[in-house]
Amino acid sequence: MTSIQAPLLCASALLALCACPKRDLPRLPDGGVDRGPVIDSHTLITPVDESIDITLELFKRVGVVKFCNKNGGYLGSRLFAATIHQKHRLKERFEFFVNPNWRGVDEPGWGQREADSLEQAVRWGARGIKFFKAMGLGARDREGKLIAVDDPRYDPIMERAAKINAIVAMHIGDPKAFFEPPTPQNERYDELKQAPDWSFYGGDYPPLLELLAARNRLIARHPKTTFLLIHVGNYPEDLDHVSRTLERFPNVYTDTAARVPEIGRKPPAEVRRFFLRWQDRIMFGTDLAIGPDHVQLGSVSEKPPTFDDAVEFYRRHYRYFETDDKDFDHPTPIQGRWKISGIKLPPEVLRKFYYDNAEKLIFKRAMGVPVVDPLEQPLPAPEPASAPAPGSSPAQ
């Protein structure tokens, strides 16, 4: 999910999704396995009861027992307050990451302020901080210049994360096609038509590989910080590149959120080797987003998704990882009009991928500060709604 711009689905229609007749999870083709419990380590569920209830109904159908939101808002925001209420409600089934507050990013002390906010958020239950793609592509200084991914103003946040054992998740760049002309010849043109602001072609946007190089320079400065490079290491188009990053930095992990369509069209043997090699550092994630006014299954859609579409979304993920079926539809058709072929991971690798890695890295993580139920103490009053600072949208 790279933008909050989504096909809108009215609240009444969303609630009606739960009224769909219940069926057993669709049977996988021959070769499927008893996958056991699943953790979706990368979701963007709006933290209100309406959205959470629908999500829990879906998860009951597809075997997801825990999930981690990457859109917890920033300390003092309404989104953060709503998130910790859901953490109180769901307890061990739910974890979350906070996000930076870009307001004042060009003022002295911004990084220290964000580091302090991160520590307080962790004391109230956050497992880390996620930087959306504003980092490198949205946040600008007072002169309107993009702030580089390896800008030193981020260092205090990275240092504090290491001190308190919080995870730093980063969405750097975007699919390679989003940096190419958004014309009908672009392989992701259908998607870019629906979300034109996802195009980073032209202007002063840096090339994708330049963004990734800056990311690596930042990681190299902080060897004690745990980094989660979401979306298959931010570069699913080149698994060799991702492998070199994982090889160079033992403090780096990744997930598969919204990138099965991309890796699924590669030779299955190549992808399987990648998963076998990095089986202890890859987590299952989908980028599922459900809110009172939107549903996204890995990306935008040409028509509002239904509850059955959401079930099928998970089914296709499972089919890809569990079987060696050939040439079937991938989870998010708008991300490319091609077929994918399964990689049939061994059961012991699937167990790590679906559950153990996220359980260890996120859910059972020993934080470096005391963590309390945030509802046991007063919370700061939410800030009044105001126009976001440049590059501050959670979409970025």
Image (cartoon, rainbow, N blue to C red):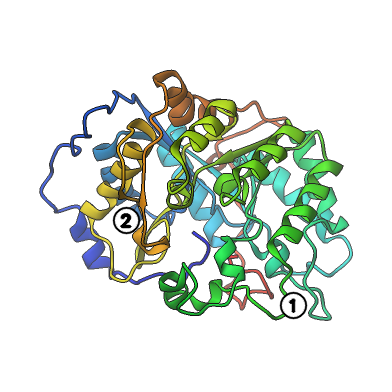
Q: Nearer the viewer, residue 230 or 276?
A: 276
Q: Quarter of the image holding residue 114?
A: bottom right
Crowd tier of the residue under label 1, counting other residues whose Cα lies within 10 Å: few below 14, some 14–19, many 20 or above: few
Residue 395 shows in this picture: no
Q: Is 185 situated left or right of 218 in this image?
A: left
> Which mark is on residue 50?
2
Q: Which residue is mark 1?
A: 204
As drawn, 354 above or below 52? above
Residue type at tag 1: Asp
- Residue 376 or residue 70, whichever sits in front: 70
Q: Which one is in front, 363 or 268?
A: 268
Q: Residue at x 69, y 68 (%)?
A: 137
Residue 298 visible in the shown view: yes
Q: As drawn, which residue projects farthest toward the left? A: 21
- Residue at 29%, 24% (x, y): give it: 33
Is 307 placed left or right of 205 in the picture?
left
Element marked by disc 1: loop
Q: Which residue lies at the image location 67% right of the left edge and 30% below the top edge?
A: 367
Is 229 located above or below residue 246 in the figure? below
Left or right for 194, reference 23? right
Q: Which residue is at the far top?
A: 348
Residue 270: x and y, percent? 52, 36
Relative to 302, residue 374 above or below: above
